[in-house]
Amino acid sequence: MPNEATRGEGFILPAATLWKRELVRFARDRHRLLGAILQPFVFWLLLGIGMSASFAPAGTSGTMSYLEYIYPGALLMVLLFTAIFSTISVVEDRREGFMQSVLVAPVSQSGVVIGKVMGGTTLAVLEGMVFLLFVYQLDIPVSPFALAATVAFLFLVGLALTGLGFAIAWQMASTAGFHAIMNLFLLPMWALSGALFPLSGVPEWLGWLMRINPLTYGVAGVRHALYLEAPELAGGIPPFEACLLVTCLFVLLTLGISLGVIRRREGVR
């Protein structure tokens, strides 16, 4: 019968090792940073500047530009791309046999899931913090406390997205199939989150899709955090308490699915 120290090492050691491995892998491939930040940055600038003259977001203050409106959605796009890039390693590690060698060792499968997901989430939040610097080019009255709240909420959303990416990647046999599923599933999920257009004013069927989309509450939560000093400027979005509750449930759901997938395919330990 393993004692408490052994069980602790079986969870903490693999989790910490896989977390560190993700950071080291990222440090050796700086192009991932450019890919995860530059594409949302270009998208944000081109769409924001191009639409500012012809589109005023409904339900927001009349002074808010479209460039400012889609900024929280661009922040989440950084997390989304980082989740895709980081969980590609799950497909590669399984194909090369690395993950199988980890799982046959006397380690906790939950430690494997947490290590991989925390590694991807750490990278996502770090890259999101880089993109967060552009907030000072907008008319958002941010304070240090608002920035800290934004980073905290980005961490929660990053956990959920990376956990979802892990659950999908574990069942994929190739990176091409993984990309296809992620683009088919996650990009529409992001587009229907209020990142591009608000919930108010859309057709009823589209409004229901947005309301049941957990990422809608992630975007709204980031918007609440950014406008912490001036909540009246955030517009008509779900209350912060609902955003926090749904996002936390989304995290628990994706981590639970990830652990269920790994146990089902590799056998319960």
Image (spheres, rainbow, N blue to C red):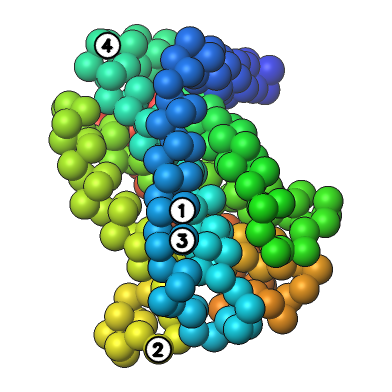
Upstream in sequence: badge 1 or badge 2: 1
Amino acid carrying mark 1 in the image: Trp
Q: Is residue 165 above or below residue 208?
A: above
Q: Residue under label 3, please give it.
A: 48
Residue 149 location, quadrant: bottom right
Upstream in sequence: badge 2 or badge 4: 4
Q: Position of residue 39 (x, y in %)?
A: 40, 40
Q: Residue at x 46, y 60 (%)?
A: 49
Whether tag 1 and tag 2 are in contact, CB under 8 A, the answer is no
From the viewer's perspective, tell me whether residue 233 is left or right of residue 166.
Answer: right
For marks 1 and 2, give the one nearer the viewer.
1
The disc at residue 257 is: none
Q: Residue at x 46, y 53 (%)?
A: 44
Distance between the alpha carbons at the discs numbered 4 and 3: 44 Å
The crowd level at tag 3 (other Cα within 10 Å; few <14, some 14-19, many 20+) is many
Upstream in sequence: badge 4 or badge 1: 1
Placement of the N terminus among the 4 image quadrants: top right
Distance between the alpha carbons at the discs numbered 2 and 3: 20 Å
Distance between the alpha carbons at the discs numbered 2 and 4: 50 Å
Q: Position of residue 177 (x, y in %)?
A: 16, 35
Upstream in sequence: badge 4 or badge 3: 3
Q: Residue under label 4, please give it.
A: 97
Whether tag 3 and tag 1 are in contact, CB under 8 A, the answer is yes
The crowd level at tag 1 (other Cα within 10 Å; few <14, some 14-19, many 20+) is many
Q: Residue under label 2, please give it.
A: 201
For marks 2 and 3, give the one nearer the viewer.
3
Residue 228 location, quadrant: bottom right
Q: Residue at x 43, y 25 (%)?
A: 32
Q: Residue at x 48, y 18 (%)?
A: 30
Number of dots carrying numbers: 4
The crowd level at tag 4 (other Cα within 10 Å; few <14, some 14-19, many 20+) is few
From the viewer's perspective, tell me whether residue 150 is left or right of residue 98.
Answer: right
